[in-house]
Amino acid sequence: MMNNQQVLNVYGAMAQLTEQMLAAARGNDWDGLVLLEEQCTAQLQLLTEQEPRAPMQGAERERKIELIRQMLTADRQIRDLTMPWMAQLSALINNTGTERRLVDAYGGV
């Protein structure tokens, strides 16, 4: 079981990772974004396994709340950046599927 300072260190690392994820999304570095997301997921797994069940109090609690807010803000911005890219990718996949069905149905030119 981690102590409160260790928990805050993990939340801090996750907040830094989400900021790096946001920078990757802004730079259209989708591979980098995925790698950073995997690192963030590993940190989350650590918290899931090791974070004490007792709630934090005082300044530690406030710091944890602030880190979570930072992560949520970055996550929202990442979603805003990735949604158009995901829609474009989906359209491309759908177009490729349509082309393949047409070739299958009518033969190639």
Image: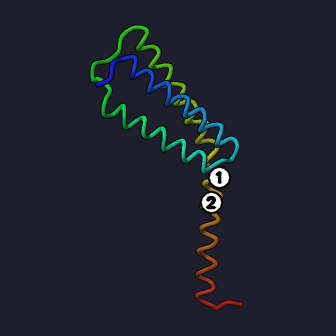
Q: Amino acid at mark 2?
A: Leu
Q: Where is residue 81, by image quadrant?
A: top right
Using a 10 Å C-alpha cutoff, classify the residue at mark 1 as few (fewer than 14 neighbours), some (14 to 19) or many (20 or more). Answer: some
* Residue shown at the point (50%, 23%) measured from the top left: 67
Tell me how many marks there are: 2
As drawn, is 68 to the left or to the right of 77? left
Q: Is residue 75 above or below residue 82?
A: above
Q: Picture coordinates of residue 40 (x, y %)?
A: 48, 38
Whether the residues at callouts 1 and 2 have beta carbons within 8 Å, the answer is yes
Quadrant of the image containing the N terminus: top left
**SS for dot 2:** helix
State how far apart marks 1 and 2 are (Cα): 6 Å
Question: Observer-nearest residue: 49 or 25?
Answer: 49
Question: Observer-nearest residue: 1 or 66?
Answer: 1
Question: Observer-nearest residue: 90 or 66?
Answer: 66
Quadrant of the image containing the C terminus: bottom right
* Residue shown at the point (59%, 32%) measured from the top left: 19
Q: Amino acid at mark 1?
A: Trp
Residue 89: which disc? 2
**SS for dot 1:** helix
Q: Is residue 35 above or below residue 65?
A: below
* Residue shown at the point (35%, 15%) measured from the top left: 56
Which residue is under mark 1?
85
As drawn, is 22 to the left or to the right of 37? right
Type of colouring: rainbow
Residue 106: which disc? none
